[in-house]
Amino acid sequence: LSSPDLLNMVSDHVYSLPAGGAVVPDYNNSCLSAFSPRGEQLFSASCHTSTAVAVAFLSNDLLWVAHLDSCQLQKHLIRPENRAESIELIARDCQDYPLDIAVAGEKLLLLRDDGIYTAVEVLDLETGDGRGLMLGGSLQMRSAESMAVQGDVVAIADMHNQRVVCLNNHDGSLVHEFGKGGNLPAAFDAEFEDDFDGDPIWVIDGLKRTWLDTRAGDGPGEFDTPRGVAFGTDRLYVSDRTRIQVLRFPEGEVVQAITYSVTPDLIGLAVLCTDGDRLWCLVQTKQSPSHPFKSNLDMYQLV
């Protein structure tokens, strides 16, 4: 339907707005950029810092914002009379890097990374205080970047394990797992970097080497670097490097795939979300040495 090309917008995440449309935490421009269901820009609200990476709405104007570099959660009220401004109500420090947040009933789920593994911390929805419960820690998720909630289930894109895992968001038990599967490479080193072309580079013996993981695949229901997950009606949407797979949920059968043409500028697909009968996905492309990538927002009509 629409593909607004927003110069210098740098982001990994996109979220549905409670009243329809989508919002992007724009890391590069220190703001939240909101779009109507037709793809028109609605407003741009200041985040007070330049590191907003994730949001979770409690209402049209009240939301939690996760800030990556400062490792902080903030609760904001966007001024209804001037949506370019927001008021910070609560600020909470995070123990690890916050990557994503989501509302699950009366809980706030925080996807956080300690530099090696990723896990989900359960927080109080109103105050942001920890409840002393961690989900998925035993799964050794690596570089999981996003999650989505439907009922009692939280789906997590476990990027460098080439899979999507679904947990019970009350006790953390594994409910479903999608992907090619297999064993972790024997020479795997948990420390890695990214060279901005989408290829993970693992640091092995101090040398940077691109590591080919046999768990990666391009067949139906297989993933290379899954980054985004979103729920629809009986559907689970997963964004991978160059395609979006639509899985029947919970069976896992692939019913549709949206494939992007590989171009020299394409880095890959980032996170996605659903908004009613629309699917929004961030597409990252190369830009310049000073800003290695920019994020464009694509929108699809779901059928």
Image (spheres, grey):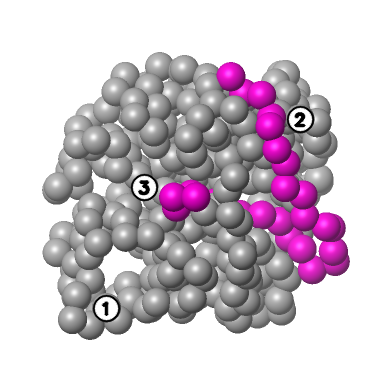
Q: Please name whichever residue, 23 or 232, is drawn nearer the observer in this view of the structure.
A: 232
Q: Is residue 133 visible?
A: yes
For residue 269, the mark is none
Q: Tell me, yes or no, whether the two marked residues, 2 and 1, touch with CB atoms within 8 Å.
A: no
276 is within the stretch colored magenta: yes
Under circle 3, the secondary element is strand
Dot 3 amino acid type: Ile
Q: Is residue 144 visible?
A: no
Measured from the top left, where is residue 189 in percent x and y? 67, 35
Instruction: Give the mark nearer the N terminus: 3 vs 2.
Output: 3
Relative horizontal placement of residue 227, taking residue 91 as reference (left or right): right
Residue named by callout 1: 83
Residue named by callout 3: 101
Instruction: Give the mark nearer the N terminus: 1 vs 3.
Output: 1
Residue 29 vs 63, above or below: the answer is below
Residue 268 vs 297, above or below: the answer is above
Residue named by callout 2: 220
Instruction: Give the mark nearer the N terminus: 2 vs 1.
Output: 1
Residue stretch in magenta: 251-277
Q: Nearer the viewer, mark 1 or mark 3?
A: 1
Measured from the top left, where is residue 19 in percent x and y? 32, 60
Dot 1 amino acid type: Arg
Q: Please name whichever residue, 13 or 188, is drawn nearer the observer in this view of the structure.
A: 13
Dot 2 amino acid type: Pro
